[in-house]
Image (cartoon, rainbow, N blue to C red):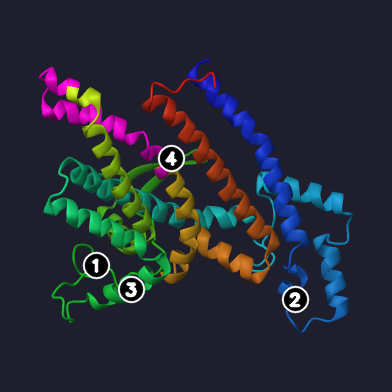
Amino acid sequence: MSRWTYFLKRVLLAIPVVFLVITFMFVLLRMGPLDPVAARLGPDATGADALRMRERLGLNDPLWEQYLQFLQEMLVFEGQSWVVQGDRHVRDVILSAGPPTLWLGFWAILLPLFIGIPLGFYAGLNPNTWGDYVASAGGILWYAMPNFWLGVMVLALMRSLDGGGTIPFDWYTFGPEINSVTGTPALDFFSTTNIGPIPVPTGIDFNDLGRDIKRILPPALVLGSASMGTELRLSRTAVLENVNSNYVETAKAKGLKTKKIVWKHIFRNALIPLVPVISNEAFILIGGSVIIEVIFNINGLGRIFFLAITGGDVPLAGSLLFMFTLIIIGINILQDFLYTIIDPRVGYER
């Protein structure tokens, strides 16, 4: 079986899972405690208003017709927001709120990868040193602090970094100037031109790019904090296991250079147990973005999902939940695919 045949097989196996998830969401949203009619009309609505709204939303139709309509709307993201976005199409909501969440998730994954894993590798290659102790203690502290508490603390700290407090550093005027660390990044640093209906990037405004990076770094650091601690500790353990392995001792006996041993043997084999950890951290980021976007007032998918759930906006909440499910299934397929590349012992036949 070729690698691409294996990939196609994994995609086909995910299709029944998608339909099971849609069915579960339909049962949960239709028969759960959410009342979309009450959420949309408010407490002052009359019984006649409620009956007309139920008829308009199709809630009086047979259950199987409601399910087929729900299935169609989920698969093509064709539903309308009932409460939060005022009859706006779900697809438009996702297209407008998706970029800030992707920007936040990108930096929340990038920071742990380039901070946590290198520190873990350094600690594993230099065990029982002061650098190892400091890195390990820092990883434990980062992992122990919950996101909702750390977000509030970081927000309070950033508001004091205006050059007038006890710390003589002004974050807001350092580099590209910003006036707040909260709010939605503009993400307009690309200049584009349309080739037919497709916008094509033609340039980058690095000043605007710097502003968006400065604004997103504090929430991204909070969102990726748990991932950073986990990846640091696990990469340290993986390096220690590989440093003392027989094949590393054999490579040393052959006279290979230390740099080659570290990069070709230790580094690659230490990445194998980190692949599921990194992909599983992406699941945590999806849920954590809800809290972080609310704290830092980012108008992304996480904040809109929170408003949709609390406001009884069934189509919007269901569509976002379905999209999160597709992302998780896609990450699982990518994880299995990466395993076949990193670890040659993993075959396609199983």
Q: Is residue 126 magenta?
A: no
Of the numbered discs 3 and 2, the one sitting upstream in the chain is 2
Is residue 281 rendered to the left or right of residue 162?
A: right
**In this rendering, does residue 217 appear at all?**
no
Q: Residue at horizontal 29%, vertical 43%?
A: 237
The Cα–Cα distance between marks 3 and 2, rounded to whole angstroms, is 38 Å
In which image quadrant can residue 156 be found? bottom left
Contact flag, marks 3 and 2 (Cβ < 8 Å): no
- Amino acid type, residue under disc 2 in the picture: Leu
Q: Earlier in the sequence, mark 2 or mark 4?
A: 2
Q: Nearer the viewer, mark 2 or mark 1?
A: 2
Point out residue 250 in the picture as x, y percentages from the top left corner: 18, 20
- Please tell me how crowded label 2 is: few (under 14), some (14-19), or many (20+) other residues with Cα within 10 Å: some
Name the residue at 66% across, 39% down: 17
Foreground mark, 2 or 4?
4
Q: Is residue 286 left or right of residue 202?
A: right
Pointer 3 or 4: first along the chain: 3
Residue on which the image places disc 4:
276
Q: Position of residue 132 (x, y in %)?
A: 17, 51
Image-quadrant location for residue 320: bottom right
Q: Provide residue 4's location: percent of width, then percent of height.
A: 51, 21
Crowdedness of circle 1 by 10 Å Cα count: few (<14), some, many (20+)? some
Amino acid type of the residue that numbered disc 3 sits on in the rendered structure: Met
Q: Amino acid at mark 1?
A: Glu
Magenta span:
250-277
Residue 187, horizontal then vertical, whole percent:
38, 56
Residue under label 1, please give it: 177
Circle 3 residue = 153
